[in-house]
Amino acid sequence: MGEAETCEIIGGRTEIKDVDSFLSRLKSIARRYNVAIQVFDASKVAGAEHLRVAVEKALRARRRGKCIAKDFSVEILLYAAGRRHVSKALEMGVSENTKEVAVTLVGDSKNIELARDEILEILERDDDVLELSKRKKESLMKFFGITDAELEAVGEEKLGLLVLERVAMLDVQK
């Protein structure tokens, strides 16, 4: 991946029967097209902006030589999760129970297009799963450690901003 890196975020629905084979297929696509691919359980994603900011911060960390992880896809995951520890960040990943996924692709725009076409063979595109909805509230609050008092202080409509604050805090924790 070089100077002309772009990012695309895809929301979709799928049935994951075997996490390892699902991830292996994505890893194979990533290698084939030289793109970074990271997949998330969409219930822990506070909108496309959440992932866009995580990718931007991971790209900036890489440009500055300040990455936490050796693998750039993992760096994206750490920022999206707002955590330094991979084991905790992985809780944002997919499992056999995951039906709605969010996928980030980072790389050359032509390669992203080719990778996206293959990814859409294994999931049904539905960008609505990216949206910050009321049904995600409990999952997001628990994962990001947002308290009722905190949410009450800013207003429920600002839940996404509280998540973005956690993402931004990872730079401070480094």
Image (cartoon, grey):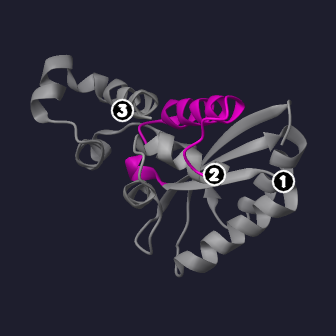
Residue at horizontal 28 percent and vertical 39 percent from the top:
134
Residue displayed at 42% across by 55% down: 92
- The residue pinned by badge 3 equals 166
Residue that protrudes farthest toward the top in the picture: 154
Q: Is residue 122 left or right of residue 137?
A: right
The crowding category of the residue bearing disc 3, from other C-alpha atoms within 10 Å (few below 14, some 14 to 19, many at least 20), is: some
* Picture coordinates of residue 166, whole percent (x, y): 36, 32
Residue 46 circle label:
none
Q: Residue at x 78, y 51 (%)?
A: 35
Residue numbers of the magenta segment: 41-70
Image quadrant holding the N terminus, namely: top right
| Residue for point 61% across, 73% down | 22
115 displayed left or right of 44: right
- Please tell me whether mark 2 sits on a helix, a strand or a loop: helix
Q: Name the quadrant containing residue 97.
A: bottom left
Name the mark on residue 34.
1
Neighbor class of circle 2 (other Cα within 10 Å; few <14, some 14-19, many 20+) is many
Asked whether, in this view, residue 79 is left or right of residue 70, the answer is left
Is 137 on the left-hand or right-hand side of 46? left
- Residue 153 image position (x, y, % from top left): 14, 19
Quadrant that contains the C terminus? top left
Determine which residue is flagged by label 2.
Answer: 73
Element on which disc 3 rests? helix
Percent position (x, y) of residue 121?
73, 65
Q: Which amino acid type is shown beneath numbered disc 2?
A: Ser
Q: Which of marks 3 and 1 is nearer the N terminus?
A: 1
